[in-house]
Image (cartoon, rainbow, N blue to C red):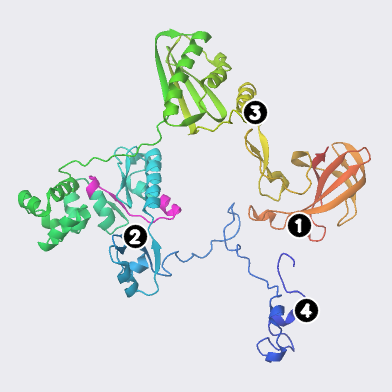
Amino acid sequence: MPRGGGWRPGARWAQGTHSGEPSLDALPAHQRPTMRELGRRSEAAAPVFRALRSDDGTSGGIAAPLPPLWGLRPTIVVARTGQRDVVTAACPAALDLGLVPGMAAAHARALVSDLDILDAAPDADRAWLDRLALHAARCWTPTAAVSGIDGLWLDLSGTTHLFGGEERFAARLLGFLRRLGFTARVAIAGTPGAAHALARDGGAGVRILPEGGESEALAPLPLAALRLAPEALAAAARFGIERIADLYPMPRGPLARRLGRGAVERLDQARGFVPEPIVPVVPFDMPEARRSLLEPIGTAEAIEQVIADLLGDLVLALRERSLGVRSLVLRCDRLDMGAQFVTVGTARATRDAKHLLRLFRLRIDRIEPGLGIETMVLAAPQVEALAPEAIAAVLNTARQAPDLAPLVDALAGRAGDAALFRLSAIESDVPERAIVRAGPLAQPAGWPVWPRPIRMLARPEALSGVVALLPDHPPRRFAWRGRSYAVVAGDGPERIHGEWWRRPGEMWAVRDYFRVEATSGERFWLFRRGDAITDKTGDLSWYMHGVFG
């Protein structure tokens, strides 16, 4: 079937009513086609990607907004608590039907029959919150912590001006979470307790509280917003205390006796009378070793000795954390307030001090000590887990494969990191996109079964003076790089279509590849743009793309 779709000849009955022909539904049962014939229809389906915006944004429109993933069926999340299942979360549709967290799952099933029930995954939820907290500590604010089971605490002191203010920071935060597929509510207040309560019970998507307005904002919220213990909430219900404002006029002594000291502490923390520290998450602590020298040094021998001492300290720290280094950065602070940096990398994670010292020896001559070096710091910005490996038994006489990592590191130290690489295949029909550089020790992916030249040009080069019989024959003569070639044998074509999902220009692009052999013995891999039938597939120009042998 051609690319545009369409009906095949002989299937006119499936197209509906035609001139003088009854429709399919109007035919008697004994004259209707069989189900086997019905399955052979080639209908012209509407292109499903036509309404989407292309990757480069040059064509196509915005598709109609899709319905939300939830809401088609009420969805709840259930966790096992003791001897019963309890609802821990509910989608907006379920909340509208009266299904709230804390309800028994059996009660929820009785209220709503068409209910989608999912098992709670607290470990996965905690892992997501930890990842978000680490991202916040690296990109937004140094102080970030996980708040309960469904939130984050961010200390924005002295950081919001970097994002254009509190309102713009809240908008950017909501946009970031929306791209990840999360819905969220943001509250910014002077105390962690007030921000926690307003984010969950404040009602607004973004709530920015002015300084000193915690008491007034917390007054209409329910008592559960203070994160009280269940016993304290039960006692408050017996006394008729429902809102946080009901606690303001009560003396501290009777309030502590009725609800416990924890309730008084939570109330004072939320109003700002008692500090509530936030225990922040700590991003990865970079392994580092430091030496402050009594006297400045400037000779290569002294620098090498200090590097050896630094490597000894760093290897001990790495061994305690079961880590191996992939890159090391040496910083040398000079007396004139200047700094010299030397970087080495390894092809595989290692903590072999002798091997790392050999790599630094190759680059000591790049250090300019100036008036002298007074401080040297060795850091490992890139590390990987390195667990002990089992070695062959003594009685095993099988020959082990040599470890190429030290050789690769030594060659890279002399020739540069970009000098050593391997070629690996990736999934792509276009030949120049099907090959990618990989690390020298990487395991290349499988190669395609189609024959490919040993040497492929970085960019196809245009041919001139091509004589060929269209549409499916290889050229009989062509000129390339100022030399004419006569072809004695050829094989092809191998048709390769463009990758339409990359850009609109490749929707109809076609290449016909041929393997040809010239009279002088060279074998080339060349192609013609277009199929010689449809004009929009190409302009029928010829290009050289590779050389065999």
Say which residue appears at 40% left-offset and 55% top-offset. 182
Label 4 sits on a secondary structure element that is loop
Say which residue appears at 37% left-offset and 58% top-offset. 120
Question: In front here: 224 or 207?
Answer: 224
Residue 338, position in %: x, y?
45, 16
- The answer to if 176 sits in the magenta stretch is yes
Question: In front here: 404 or 176?
Answer: 404
Which residue matches tag 4?
10
Dots 4, 3 in contact, CB < 8 A = no
Residue 244, position in %: x, y?
16, 56
Question: What is the distance, in whole Å, between disc 3 and disc 1 at their CAs?
Answer: 51 Å
Residue 548, position in %: x, y?
82, 40
Q: Is residue 422 visible?
A: yes
Dots 2, 3 in contact, CB < 8 A = no
Direction from residue 380 to residue 208 in the image, left or right: left
Label 1 sits on a secondary structure element that is helix
Label 3 sits on a secondary structure element that is loop
Disc number lying in front (1 or 2): 2
Disc 4 residue type (three-letter) = Gly
Magenta stretch: give its range.
175-193
Disc 1 residue type (three-letter) = Thr
Question: In front here: 83 or 548?
Answer: 83
Q: Which mark sits nearer the N-terminus, 4 or 1?
A: 4
Question: What is the distance, in whole Å, between disc 4 and disc 3 at their CAs?
Answer: 66 Å
Which residue matches tag 2?
79
Which residue matches tag 1?
537
- Mark carried by residue 402: 3
Q: Which mark sits nearer the N-terminus, 3 or 1?
A: 3
